[in-house]
């Protein structure tokens, strides 16, 4: 049975965008991050643009925001702040493997956390430049683009006064169309990764200095030397002396203030363009797509949910909360039970969905574990389910998305039909046109019931 659930997905998208906006408004260089990245990519030569074409939209809309999405609040209640009236935040962090690409997991405290302000933001630029170069030189384009997005973020933050919070929090460009360069030819920062990394380190320091010089006259005109403001802001997060100046400038000299932030954004574009251009100069060329999936082999990562990184979740999977306002449904990595009653098909673990809302609650493959597919290939996906309550509210879906990671088609299995017994559900599908990615979604919407999923299997058919 093949059903397209595009409308339901559309609603989900609208809801997600709404929450994205809520999250974004908290950050300076909010939408500016996306525009700066896009304009920087636009300065590349056609062959370089073509090289990253399949990932460009994802870099612009998503990857360059990764460091701002690397918080444990994703997937939790209250807009991430515990607001009792706020809804649940979608779990972007796990969905995109954000902590992996930022190389800092805030839940299990693994890796290195870099603050978004200098000097740490400068260091982070160098670290993620190297990660991106390393991935690209091995022909791992998607990984390279994701690391590059993290680097772009730190580069852009370094040009938005994060070391002076009162100015940082007002650092916005109202007219986003003004972020653009008439003509700019990006510069190669070095012939070797080491040399380029060193030059980029200097380049980002220059960027910060450039933005400070740009705002100095404005501060002078308001009677506070920029260096003095900086010193005050080192000791206090939101010093009133600096806040007053920023407020006054915004009120009395709005046009000059806006032209200052716009110039800073455009200087960020130049630095980002140089960094991207240089990373791509080290990429493996020509790009060779990974060979098609082997026939007859289970290609699902962590199919029996046995592996974890220690954060209480199965590795490579995340929860899709299709109803962000639902306060009852639970999705848990299941490893409980007693000696004689353990709801696992094999091994020690399964995934559980309990009291799912009518809009649905899912276990979904995270994007970094999605399967790259080609139109026309045939796949069979299956899972074992044991359900109580309303078993027919549970099934497996194969979701197909285009190169912008937007769903274009979903194929569902028949729903579960027996109660409290393990049953294998399966679906066969030919990959539709426009598809580049396939993900497994384990769907539940059986309201008062419970369902356990185990042993997912996806194979390419001959
Ligand atoms: Zn930012
Ligand atoms: Zn940031």
Image (cartoon, rainbow, N blue to C red):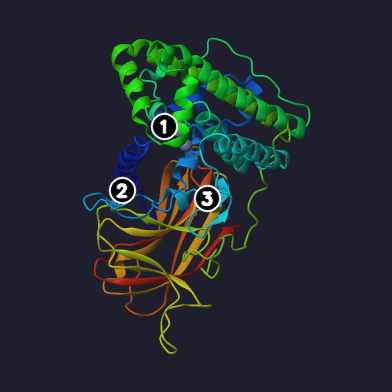
User: Which quadrant of the figure has residue 447?
Assistant: bottom left
Q: Nearer the viewer, residue 26 or 6?
A: 26
Q: Residue at position x 46%, y 72% from top?
A: 350
Earlier-in-chain disc, 3 versus 2: 2
Asked whether, in this view, residue 47 is left or right of residue 306, the answer is right
Earlier-in-chain disc, 1 versus 2: 2
SS for dot 1: helix
Quadrant showing the C terminus: bottom right
* Residue contact at pointers 3 and 2, CB within 8 angstroms: no
Residue 79 image label? 2
Asked whether, in this view, residue 158 is left or right of residue 296, the answer is left
Reading the image, the residue beneath label 3 is: 99
* Residue contact at pointers 1 and 2, CB within 8 angstroms: no
* Marks 1 and 2, how far apart at CA: 22 Å
SS for dot 3: helix
Q: Is residue 169 above or below residue 173?
A: below
User: Which quadrant of the figure has residue 320?
Assistant: bottom left
User: Which quadrant of the figure has residue 52?
Assistant: top right
* Marks 1 and 3, how far apart at CA: 25 Å
* Residue contact at pointers 1 and 3, CB within 8 angstroms: no
Neighbour class for label 2 at 10 Å: few (<14), some, many (≥20)? many
Report x, y in % for residue 16: 34, 43
Q: Nearer the viewer, mark 1 or mark 2?
A: 1
Question: Is residue 97 in view?
Answer: no
Earlier-in-chain disc, 1 versus 3: 3
Reading the image, the residue beneath label 1 is: 165
Q: Nearer the viewer, residue 346 or 314?
A: 314
Question: Is residue 3 in view?
Answer: yes
The outermost residue toward the left is 85
């Amino acid at each position: 049975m093949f059903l397209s659930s595009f409308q339901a997905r559309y609603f989900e998208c609208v809801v997600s965008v709404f929450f994205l906006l809520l999250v974004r408004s908290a950050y300076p260089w909010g939408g500016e991050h996306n525009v700066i990245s896009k304009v920087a990519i636009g300065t590349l030569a056609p062959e370089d643009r073509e090289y990253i074409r399949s990932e460009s939209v994802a870099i612009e809309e998503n990857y360059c925001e990764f460091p701002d999405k690397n918080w444990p609040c994703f997937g939790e209640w209250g807009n991430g702040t515990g607001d009792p009236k706020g809804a649940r935040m979608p779990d972007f962090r796990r969905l995109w493997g954000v902590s992996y690409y930022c190389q800092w997991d805030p839940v299990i405290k693994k890796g290195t956390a870099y603050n978004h302000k200098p000097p740490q933001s400068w260091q982070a630029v160098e670290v993620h430049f190297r990660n991106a170069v390393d991935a690209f030189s091995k022909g791992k384009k998607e990984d390279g683009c994701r690391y590059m997005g993290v680097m772009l973020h730190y580069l852009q933050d370094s040009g938005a006064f994060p070391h002076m919070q009162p100015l940082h929090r007002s650092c916005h460009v109202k007219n986003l169309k003004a972020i653009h360069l008439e003509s700019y030819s990006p510069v190669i920062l070095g012939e070797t990764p080491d040399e380029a990394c060193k030059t980029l380190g200097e380049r980002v320091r220059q960027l910060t200095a450039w933005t400070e010089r740009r705002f100095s006259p404005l501060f002078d005109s308001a009677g506070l030397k920029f260096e003095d403001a900086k010193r005050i802001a080192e000791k206090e997060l939101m010093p009133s002396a600096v806040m007053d100046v920023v407020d006054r400038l915004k009120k009395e000299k709005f046009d000059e203030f806006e032209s200052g932030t716009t110039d800073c954004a455009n200087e960020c574009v130049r630095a980002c363009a140089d960094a991207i251009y240089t990373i791509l100069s080290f990429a493996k060329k020509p790009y060779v797509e990974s060979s098609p999936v082997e026939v007859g082999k289970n290609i699902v990562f962590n199919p029996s949910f046995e592996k974890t990184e220690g954060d209480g979740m199965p590795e490579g999977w995340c929860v899709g909360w299709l109803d962000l306002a639902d306060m009852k449904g639970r999705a848990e990595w299941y490893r409980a039970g007693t000696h004689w009653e353990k709801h696992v098909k094999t091994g020690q673990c399964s995934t559980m969905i309990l009291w799912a809302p009518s809009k649905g609650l899912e276990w979904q493959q995270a994007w970094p574990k999605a399967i790259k597919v080609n139109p026309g290939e045939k796949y069979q996906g299956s899972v074992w389910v044991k359900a109580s309550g309303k078993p027919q509210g549970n099934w497996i879906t194969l979701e197909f998305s285009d190169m912008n990671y937007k769903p274009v088609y979903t194929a569902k299995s028949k729903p579960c039909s027996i109660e409290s017994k393990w049953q294998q559900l399966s679906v066969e599908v030919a990959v539709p046109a426009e598809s580049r990615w396939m993900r497994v979604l384990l769907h539940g919407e059986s309201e008062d019931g419970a369902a356990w999923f185990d042993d997912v299997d996806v194979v390419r058919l001959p």
